C-alpha cells in the first residue's frame, strides 16, 4: 500500500504535471532550453541531498528499529511540500523548485525505508514476486489518481474549477492527501523484524555512525555487492532521468500537452501487468537476467527518442517504457535484497538509494547542460544511452546464487 500511496507523487508530480507547470506556468516566457536547465538542476539537487543523508539515516534506523517511523516522517515532509505547491504564484520558479526538492527528498527518503522492508515482509524465495506486487500496486494506485487529475485538467468546470491552471494546482493538493492517507496502512500494519535490541535515539545515532564506517569497509571487500551497486548507479540513473525528463522533452519538441499526459497514463496501466510479469520472470530466469533485458530495451528507447517526431511515436515509446520500467526497478530491489546481510537492511538500502541518487545528480544535470549548450534536446536525451551501456557492463560481473 505504500507503493500505492507514494506513486501518486511519481506520476502526477514528478513525471506529469510538475515538468509541464514548471515550464509553462512557473517559467512563463523563459526559453525552453533554459527551463530544461532549471528543471535538471532541481532534480540533481534533490538527488544530491538524498545521497548525502541516506546511508547514515538508514544505519540509525536499523539501530533504533525505526524504519517505519522514519518512513512516516519522510512521507509527511514530502506530502506537505507537494501540497504547498498550490500556493506558488505564476513566474515564481525558484520557490517551486525549492518545494520540489523538499518533496523529492521526502519521496526518495521514504522509499529507502520502504525498499528495506522487503526483507521484513517476505522470505528470500519470494523477493522477486513480492517486489513485483509492490510496483504493480504503485502503477495502479498512481495511475488511478493521475487519471482523476488529468480529468480535472481537461474538464476543470466539471470539478468546479476556473481553468486548467487551477486544476493542476489542486492536483498537487490531492497528491499530498493521497500520499499521506494511504501511508497509514503501512504505519499501522507493517512490523519490522528486529535482529537486535532497539537503542534510544542518542545511542542509535552514535552506533549508526560507527556501523556506517564498518559497512564501508565491508563493501570494499565484497566484490558482488560492489559490482551491483556500481551497475545500479549507472543504469537506474538512466531510468530515473527518462522518467523525470520525458514530458519536458516532448514539450521541447513541440508535441501537444494533452498527448503527453495521455501517454503517461498509458505507462501506468501498461506498467501494472508488466511489473507482475517481471516478478514472475525473475523467479524463472533470475533477477539479473531480467534486469539486463530491461536495460537493453531502455538503451533502445533512448536511441528511438532521438528520432522521435510525432505524438504517435511518443505514445509507442510510452508503451515500451511501461513494459520495462517497473520490471527493472522491482528486480533491482529484489536482487539487492538477496545481497543484504541480516539486520542491516535499512543501512544497506541507504547505500542502494545513495548509488541511485548520487548517479541521478549526473543524469538530469547532464541532459540540462547538453540542452543548454547545444540548444538540441535530442542530443540531451541521446546522452542517456551511455549510462545503460556502463550499467549493463558492471551488472554482467555480478554473480548471485539461486534463491533458497
Image (cartoon, rainbow, N blue to C red):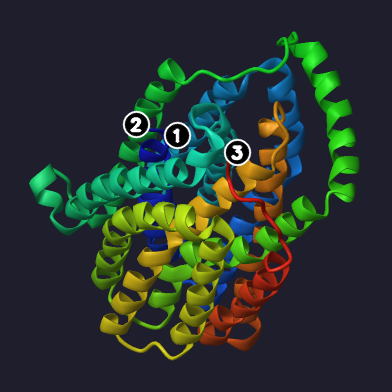
Q: Quadrant of the N terminus?
A: top left
Question: N-terminal of the two: label 2 or label 3?
Answer: 3
Which residue is found at the position 74% from the left and 66% from the top?
397
In this view of the protein, which residue sits in the foreground, 254 or 93?
Answer: 254
Which residue is found at the position 72% from the left and 55% from the top?
229
Can you identify the residue that label 3 sits on?
Answer: 112
**What's the distance in space between the residues labelled 1 and 3, CA to CA?**
16 Å
In the depicted structure, whether residue 100 falls above or below residue 15? above
Q: Secondary structure at mark 3?
A: helix
Can you identify the residue that label 2 sits on?
Answer: 177
Residue 106's x, y, as percent?
55, 37
Residues at marks 1 and 2 touching, judged by CB atoms closer than 8 Å: yes
Residues at marks 2 and 3 touching, judged by CB atoms closer than 8 Å: no
In the figure, is residue 103 to the left or right of 178? right
Can you identify the residue that label 1 sits on?
Answer: 79
Question: N-terminal of the two: label 1 or label 2?
Answer: 1
Q: Secondary structure at mark 1?
A: helix
**What's the distance in space between the residues labelled 1 and 2, CA to CA?**
7 Å
Amino acid at each position: 500500500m505504500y507503493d500505492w500511496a507514494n506513486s501518486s507523487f511519481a506520476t502526477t508530480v514528478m513525471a506529469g504535471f510538475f515538468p509541464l507547470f514548471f515550464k509553462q506556468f512557473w517559467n512563463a516566457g523563459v526559453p525552453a532550453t533554459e527551463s530544461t536547465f532549471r528543471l535538471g538542476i532541481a532534480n540533481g539537487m534533490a538527488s544530491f541531498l538524498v545521497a548525502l543523508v541516506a546511508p547514515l539515516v538508514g544505519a540509525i534506523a536499523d539501530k533504533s528499529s525505526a524504519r517505519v517511523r522514519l518512513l512516516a516522517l519522510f512521507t509527511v515532509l514530502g506530502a506537505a511540500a507537494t501540497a504547498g505547491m498550490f500556493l506558488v504564484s505564476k513566474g515564481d520558479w525558484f520557490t517551486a523548485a525549492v518545494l520540489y526538492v523538499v518533496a523529492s527528498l521526502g519521496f526518495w527518503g521514504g522509499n529507502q525505508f520502504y525498499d528495506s522492508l522487503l526483507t521484513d515482509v517476505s522470505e528470500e524465495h519470494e523477493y522477486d514476486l513480492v517486489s513485483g506486487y509492490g510496483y504493480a500496486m504503485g502503477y495502479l494506485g498512481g495511475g488511478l489518481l493521475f487519471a482523476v487529475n488529468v480529468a480535472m485538467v481537461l474538464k476543470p468546470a466539471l470539478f468546479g474549477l476556473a481553468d486548467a491552471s487551477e486544476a493542476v494546482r489542486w492536483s498537487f493538493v490531492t497528491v499530498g492527501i493521497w500520499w499521506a492517507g494511504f501511508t497509514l496502512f503501512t504505519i499501522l500494519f507493517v512490523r519490522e523484524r528486529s535482529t537486535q535490541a532497539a537503542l534510544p535515539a542518542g545511542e542509535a545515532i552514535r552506533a549508526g555512525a560507527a556501523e556506517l564506517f564498518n559497512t564501508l569497509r565491508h563493501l570494499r571487500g565484497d566484490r558482488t555487492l560492489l559490482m551491483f551497486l556500481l551497475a545500479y548507479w549507472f543504469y537506474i540513473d538512466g531510468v530515473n532521468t527518462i522518467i523525470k525528463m520525458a514530458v519536458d522533452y516532448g514539450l521541447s519538441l513541440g508535441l501537444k500537452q494533452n498527448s503527453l499526459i495521455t501517454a503517461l497514463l498509458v505507462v501506468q496501466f501498461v506498467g501494472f501487468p508488466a511489473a507482475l510479469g517481471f516478478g514472475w520472470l525473475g523467479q524463472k530466469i533470475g533477477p539479473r537476467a531480467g534486469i539486463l533485458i530491461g536495460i537493453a530495451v531502455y538503451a533502445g528507447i533512448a536511441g528511438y527518442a532521438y528520432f522521435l517526431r510525432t505524438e504517435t511515436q511518443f505514445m509507442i515509446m510510452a508503451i515500451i517504457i511501461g513494459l520495462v520500467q517497473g520490471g527493472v526497478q522491482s528486480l533491482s530491489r529484489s536482487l539487492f535484497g538477496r545481497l543484504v546481510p541480516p539486520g542491516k537492511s535499512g543501512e544497506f538500502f541507504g547505500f542502494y538509494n545513495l548509488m541511485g541518487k548520487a548517479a541521478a545528480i549526473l543524469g538530469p544535470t547532464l541532459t540540462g547542460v547538453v540542452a543548454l549548450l547545444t540548444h538540441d534536446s535530442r542530443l540531451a536525451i541521446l546522452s542517456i544511452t551511455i549510462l545503460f551501456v556502463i550499467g549493463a557492463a558492471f551488472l554482467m560481473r555480478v554473480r548471485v546464487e539461486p534463491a533458497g
